[in-house]
Image: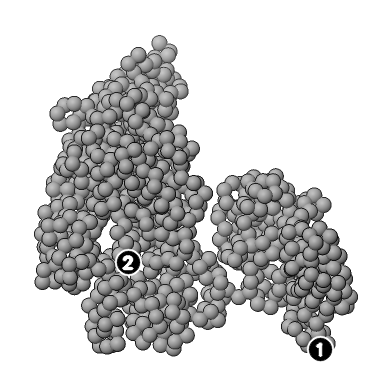
Amino acid sequence: MWMALLLGMGWLSIPALPGSDVVDPVGGERARGVLTFRVESSDGNTVPARLTFREPDGSTPSLFMNRAANPSDLAIRADVICTLSGAGSITVPTGTWKVYASRGPEWSIDQQTITIETDQTLEITLSLEHQVDTRGWAAADYHLHTLTHSGHGDSNMPERIISIASEALEVGVATDHNVHTDYSDIISELGAGDEFQGIVGNEISVPLGHFNAFPLEPWANVIDRNSADGPALFRAIRAAGDASGNIPVVQVNHPRWDGIDYFRVAGLDPITGGSVARNWSVDFDSVEIFNENAGWGYRDADNTEHMVGSSRHWVLQDWHNLLNHGARVTGVGNSDSHTVSSNLAGWPRNYFPSSSDLPAEISVKEVCDTVKAGQIVTTFGPFVTFSVNDASMGEIVTARKAAVRLKTKVQAADWIDVDRVLVIVDGDIVETIPVPDTRDIVRLLDERMIPVRTDGWISLRVEGDDSLDPIVPGSKRPVLPIAITNPVYVDADGDGKYTPPVEVARLWIEQHGDNESMLYAEWQARQPNQRASMLHACNVDSASTRTLARWGITDPSRLVRLCACRLIERIGCGDDPALKQPIIELATAEGSDPWLRVVALRALAADVAGDILTTLLRKSGKQSFSPHASEITHLLPGQWVMKWRATDPLPFSGEAGLRKVLAMPGSERPFRRGVLAAESGIVDLKKYGAAHGRSEKCTVVLDCVLYSPDDRMVTIAAGSDDGCILMVGNQLLIEDFAQQGVDPMRHLVQASLQRGSNSLVMLIENGGGGYGAAVRILDDEVRIAQAGASQSRRSTGDPLQRITSDMAGIEAAAQLFFLDEGRWPKNLDELTEDKGLVLPVVDPWGNHYRLHSSTTRFTVLCLGADGSEGGDGINADIISEK
């Protein structure tokens, strides 16, 4: 009686004891009941589906902790259960919950509110209808992972198969990192062969970036994971293939995802769409313009209020640039799912023409060929088909009377919003077609003429404004219904071939560029991306080039202004009076975004840009340029610290580790050797640590000497990966304990320097991953030297006495070198870097000592106070010979 009373009052609960046919995903001691569910299609048969649970107010609950319950049918997470069979009995915590059943974007959804009582069983049926007619098309996700083989995420192999089936994908490409994963055995064991077809692939994850390759043989050798050469990597992928002779698709993944971004690593200019880097190649088939449920890449990372992840630039514009240059690169969208629910498989997905609607009968060759032919629609829900003069995606059509006929059909399940169709010509939105406010499955049937002046390409973008939540929750931002088609190519001039927009512009300028009135008329007739193509087509400094640059710098379109700035930088005419002032106005305008400001500064002469940059930094700090400050560090006054002394990596990390090392006496962390920074100013401590004992969970101490001509305040720019402490003399300037990459302008601090030498000490810790630091002294009159025995204290006394002592030390070291190597050293680096000797490298005035050697003679040269050869008095050269 007392137990019943306590139960009724909610003070005591007894976990349900499931029967043999009840699966217990709840786990633990939580009070529960049983839910018997059935997810049916219109014919009354059960179908694989995803059940999503929500609180009555729509918030996300944490209900299911026992992921291992019934792994042959269920993939279980806290608020989601994916079911392969579409039916079963499961435990559910007591309470009232909303339950949604879904099966990808082609199907309707169903929702019921349930109340679960302790030890009670509730039965429900959820009905789904296949609403969108996709006959002749199949849905694929070309980028899927497992924890089993990628080593991160949370989806094991059976869970991945179940989650793919629950989203009604017909094709799933296995792309674990540097592994050839084969789903076939698990598909067979689970009996999922009728639901979808798996293809063996690999996300080749190398320093150059991340690239998917498929199809591959599971037993084949994995591509070199250290590759940093694009052309060689793509050749190696295409040479792999499968037993049927299929040449693999090469897909560039998340090309602007900071740290694993091929476009940045290989130097692809986000403005021009070109690269001169040796490791760049456009010999790939496809690029992700959507990545993950968040759709990274779709938004302009430099000009949007939306979250853009770690992207620095706009992948959609990158794709448009490549198309405008003539690259036949297919735009795709993939989930990149490593998990069951936090990043769902199949959102986004790709539709391709298929000769069979049965997954098991879909040809792998057809999967690959449709990607290579550009016959893909990538989508977060809407299904769009279109033709241009009855031609499909990837084909070339001939315009008639400067126009083409566009036919469009848009379908969407009744729970998915569609508001507009954007007609894209050469990257520009030329028409917006409103979609009727209805939830009919066929949302739009439209036919219209689209004017075309020149050869170019046409694609469609479909957008809806209502989020897909809770079916596709937006943990980082709302997931919106969007679809993008690949283009149809238009031969507008009737010459029987397609000429890409940049080449069209180049030929036009070549023929008519000397006629300014014709040039202006052509400029006015063009849309922004087409004007950008005119600017990209200018490769020489000419009157027409400067005219176009002048028009571009004041164009209403931000895109055109960016392109004009880049053109001016490329041809080096930023000091032209007709261009200089408009560029300065762009760089300093309150309304300019950081990227536009950075690009404008780069277009100016270095001295002008440096002055403006210094002023802006003092006024508002690096926020004026973030996150692109590294693009303009070369314009800053002063110089990078290029030569450091370094300790061995010490086994301490994090804030506690940094403070422990800082408190150590010098004898416990002696400086052992020199280390050089790269041209960018960043010293690679990952490489240094690997060569000297450890590169993770450690701290390295660096130091150098700053020589100041007088007592003064200087600005120091610094950044680190990960945390750091920076001191100048006794001044503690930076304490930063964040886990982060190196941003050379993360910190801008003021330091007080005394006349003569001043020590700079930096402690950098690494918890894991990348490891490095950069420091720049923003003062042209302060000299920097690697610290040494005679440089670690303030310079005092007679300079000649100091020089004589320095030279004696260098000569002694040179003699030891001669005994070891049988020759004199060529420079001081051979003594300090190669031999690890601590030597003075600069004279009392901060100028570097110079070495000259032959087979018989060794000379140390001091250039005197003026740092130049010759001179009298304190400017006279001092020479010591051996």
Q: Is residue 265 above or below residue 355?
A: below
Image quarter hosting the C terminus: bottom right
Between 541 and 432, the one lying in front of the other is 541
Residue displayed at 29% across by 28% down:
192
Residue ranking furthest to the top: 1
Q: Is residue 653 visible?
A: no
Image quadrant in which you'd find residue 818: bottom right
Image quarter hosting the N terminus: top left
Mark sitting earlier along the chain (2/1):
2
Q: Which mark is residue 325?
A: 2
Q: Residues within 10 Å of mark 1 (few under 14, many from 20)?
A: few
Residue displayed at 12% across by 57% down:
390
Q: Position of residue 539 (x, y in %)?
A: 38, 77
Image quadrant in which you'd find residue 553: bottom left
Q: Is residue 830 above or below residue 563?
A: above
Residue displayed at 44% across by 20% down:
12
Kind of residue indicated by mark 2: His
